[in-house]
Image (spheres, coloured by chain):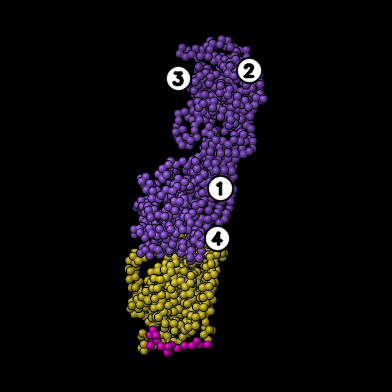
Chain colours: A purple, B yellow
Amino acid sequence: MFRSRTAALGAIFGLLFCVVTLRLAWVQLVRADHYDRLAIRTRIGKETLLARRGRILDRHGVPLAFDVPGFNLSVRIGYTLRNTTLGALCQLSSFFPPGGEESRIGPRFCQPDRWILSLKVSDLEAIPSQPRRDDAFSKLRRLLRVVSGKEMRLDARRTTTAQETLGEYLGPVRSEELVDRISENDGENGLWSIAVPLLLAVDRPWIELVARDPAPWIDRVLEISGAQVAEISDRYLRLECRTLFSSLLHTERKSVDARVRDDFEKSLATAVAGGSQEAKRTILRGLSKDFAHLEEIASELQMELSAVLAELDAVWLKADARVRSAVGRYLREENDDVTDRQLSNAWADRFRDYPLRRQRLFTGIPYDAVLTVFEFDIPGFEIAERSHREVRSAHDLHIAGWTGLVTEEELSEYRARIAGFESMVVDGGLPLEAKQEFDRLERSGLRRDEVLGRSGLEGKLDDTLRGRHGYQKLLRDRRGRTVEVVEEQRPVPGLDLTLTIETRYQEIAIEALRGRPGAVVMLEVGSGHVLCLVSSPGFELESFRANFSDLSSDPRHPLINRACRIPIGYFPGSTFKIVLAVAGLEEKVITTESTFVCGGSLRPGRQHSFKCLGVHGEVALTRAIAKSCNVFFYRLGEALGSDRIAKWGRKLGFGQPTGIELREDRGFLNSISTSRRGWSIGDTWHLSIGQKEIAVTPIQVAQMMSVIAQDGVLIPPTLIAAVGGKTAVPREHIDVGISSEILRIIQVALAEVVSVGTAEGTGLDEFRAAAKTGTAQVGGVEPDETWFVGYAPRERPRVVVCVFLERADGSTAETVVPIGRTMFEAYFGEREDGL
Amino acid sequence: MRSLLGEGGVVGPWGRESTWVGRRLSPGAFRRFDFVIVFVTASLLFVGSLFIRSASYSSTTGTTAGFADRQLQWIGLAALVLVVTLSVRYTTVVQLSSLLYLGVLATLVYTLYFGDVKNNSRRWIMLTGSYGIQPSEFVRPILILCLAQHLRFRPRPGSPRGVLVPLLLAGVPAVLIAAQPDLATGILLVPIALAMTFVAGARIRSFLLTGGVSLILFVPVYFFVLHDYQRERITTFVSPSSADRAGSGYQVDQSLIMIGSGGLTGKGLGQGPQNRLDYLPEAHTDFIFSVIGEEWGFLGCLLVLGLFWVLVAMCFAVALRVREPTGRLIAIGVATSIALPVFINTAMTVGAAPTTGVPLPFISYGGSSLLSHIIGIGLVLNVDFRKVPVIARGDFEP
């Protein structure tokens, strides 16, 4: 019997050992890799090191679009709650609203009240406006008004914190008085949440006031806590009180001498003794955390109280048990049935559902504020560098463009493409082209909060500007503290773009346009550099940030860059006559001697007449250009035929993109063979004077003029002078194929426009400019579009200016020509000697 | 036949010495001394102190908490206790077991009211500022002695009462310990009693009956007696899907990660990254096996389990070798008191059993546990080398 039973028992134990061994084999041999990966994931965190986005500079290095260093504050609630320190716990309890729906923390549930109080006023204003901030801000103002009876004037004390400012306002007000004032004015209890921490942290005289007479305050605190947490278990009440007393204790230790502290503790004890049962308990719960256990531990460790405090924060997890037991003992002495376990579970319960992943609280906090935030030193609260994009002025947005956060769709599309390429790699080899694209995609490494260029140069040259993010693999301990940097890849900053734009010209052009819809383009002769590119109307930076949708639906289309886009369709008008003149001479349809008779109009049928500006009689080319005689060009166009006009139009850059580094419209250029509908002689006439059958952008017109100024060489306009400090490759020079005699003829004719023609007496002569004006009828009662395009000086052209106004309120000489003159003035004014 | 020694009723709690033969150590006693047990125990203690040092190192602070040094002090004390345990004849101690039992019950009651609180439970009597003992740990050897005395001449306790009395003997201190609260230590007394009763020859029927009754009793206990956190642990174990990362589930997760990442050969002593980074709280006590798993791998775990298995097997061997029924029962009791915590603890670390506060014998940090287990080992050695001659039932069996 004994032997068999012993054997049976031995067998049972053997079985149990086998179970453990088998399970061990499963975990350590079969699943080892899985757990090893898990382990690595647990202890190694990857942090992205963000690449600085390249700046956009004007030709002299003035930044037009640039990153402003800033910081994001984010929190990992999971980390915080699991690993927090004692002092931080007290701080924390105030950050999170109690139970119910609201306890699911998202950025909007974090109370910024207290953060705000500790920020400098100037920094406070720098925090982007958001409902919570504004709410706290208005509360603060209200509180100040209530407490001091004065309006808050924070701006005078920009370098002090809001808290200190309030301290100054408070002065020697009696505590009851304060309480009364606040309660009277506090309709929905909104003020107390900010008032209590504020008042507790303010100033020495106030603390002394409280210390002398804490009873009303204690009552008030209970009231507040009760009011705030009406439906919540008293667990929260306890936390509220603990917070309160801990901050009280903290401040008081710093600034009040021992005698006052003793008094305070004594009177507090009296208040406790005299209070209601519930009040007693609550206060004890609050106090035991902050007085009783500290002294107990201090005596146990034979240390100074302050040393214990420091120690506590350092080894919170170890101290926790002792702290809890101290609290527990206190409570039991009060015949309370709260156990230590329940007490400690309070935290766990309260924060059980808080997520582990990082959540952003604020973005774009300035550096000074970061230092303040660091004082909190709570595990899980993280500051990450994250700059935001600024532009010098709203007008620069037309060129620089704007940036925006990556959208969910872009992100998933990006990931799908990466995955597609990856599967191609797995399937075997990528074609070279796909490989390059894959590399580019991988390099760009889209992150969830990636900032992408959305328009303008930011959009076009996003890859260049964005740089390449790096990363850091960090070894972290259980509390989320970094122990070691395991692996690091430094970010490659984006390249700076140096533009050909000169800010000074931009400003002058903006002023000259006076907000009228239109554009000014200024090209440097010989290089294709765009010195000035302004579109009007502009907009305010504030409204751009706040009401983007309003701007984009504005009928005046302020967001569209009129220099290279066509919101309604621009006819070049008489400026197109240059093309006709070139075509006529090159195709040998006319000579300089050829004349047509201008009778003031052409009347092909009964219903329609094609008018001229006047009656010019018998005109030759030079005079026809100077006086802008329509009839001459109707006849010339007729003789050329629309196809040959279109051919030369295209040679001079119309109907096709110029290649400028911005989003542009190509316009159109119809002729008899490309027209989809029927073509009549009237259409040819329209085309001949740049009406209806052709649409152009100001940059195209400027480019056309630059061909004339550059003796028949077309240099596509460019905005980029240098990328990352390296001079950009010059654009290809295209010889249009105009003989030099013909160019000479045209140049002389354009000079005559200024000296005796349509731009006579406008002061352009003083720059020795050659130019052509133009007026295009839009049709109906709409005002005309007016053009000015010219270069100077005639002998050795250096600059081309093109001015365009969408809705002229006068003749060309009254509207566009003065603007052109201003631009020449701007260009030549500073270098009179260079003329 | 109730007793092999006849109807004389010579066996009482304070039975006369003349009942026993061989009151002195025979000259060959030390030749029969089982040095394997001593060697295995010493090995376990050595491994234990290695890993306590490893587990209490934190690479964040770069410091080692003083647990390893304190454990060495306890080991020194344990050696002394072992010598004392060996020097008194176990039969003498068995005769005093009733007194000891009452004494330890009194101590438990005292602890319940005047004990010191640590880790949220009142289970300590502090001797000096930082050294204390847990009386609950010392219940185990005393209970074994007591049961051995009670069961020695009951080869086949006829009725369920034969099971009930030992259960009661174990149950009273178990409840007192569970009230501290230290559920696991308390409950573990019961299987020790069951094992001894089983080996002593109780009817299987009686076990089944008792088992059924206690299952019925468990339901109200679960809902009305257990603390929240105890219930929670049971639920976490039964349905681990409730992702309770902050509580006991977190520890098991981390423990599994540590053990699993150890693989076959481990990361090397003191080199386990998860251990060094302090991912498993209380690694030096209840979860020390996880550290072994991470740093010594599967082979190390097998070695430790093997050592335990040898120890348990040696205790069984002693039980089979010795004829004297009290000694046999003591050896079986001690074997059970080692095997069960080893199983429960290791199964817990690999996620095969609920999280309980049962330390790994000889290895986990803790003085009282060490001392009580050493006393057990001492008793087995005592039983073995005293070789109290007796005419036992087995002698007449074919």
Give the total of numbered labels: 4
Q: Which mark is residue A748?
A: 2
Describe the element under mark 2 as helix, strand or loop: helix
Q: Which residues are magenta?
A: B10-27
Chain bearing mark 4: B
Chain bearing mark 2: A
Asked whether the residues under marks 1 and 2 belong to the same chain, the reply is yes
Indicate the position of residue A423 as horizontal and vertical percent values.
Answer: 53, 47
Disc 3 or disc 4, which is closer to the eye?
A: 4
Q: Which mark is residue A319?
A: none
* Crowd band around label 1 with a 10 angstrom C-alpha radius: few (<14), some (14–19), many (20+): some
Indicate the position of residue A311 as horizontal and vertical percent values.
Answer: 51, 60
Which badge, 1 or 2, is on the more N-terminal residue? Answer: 1
Q: Which residue is mark 4?
A: B61
Asked whether the residues under marks 1 and 4 belong to the same chain, the reply is no
In this view, the residue in front, A178 or B23, is: A178
Task: Identify the main secondary structure in magenta.
Answer: loop
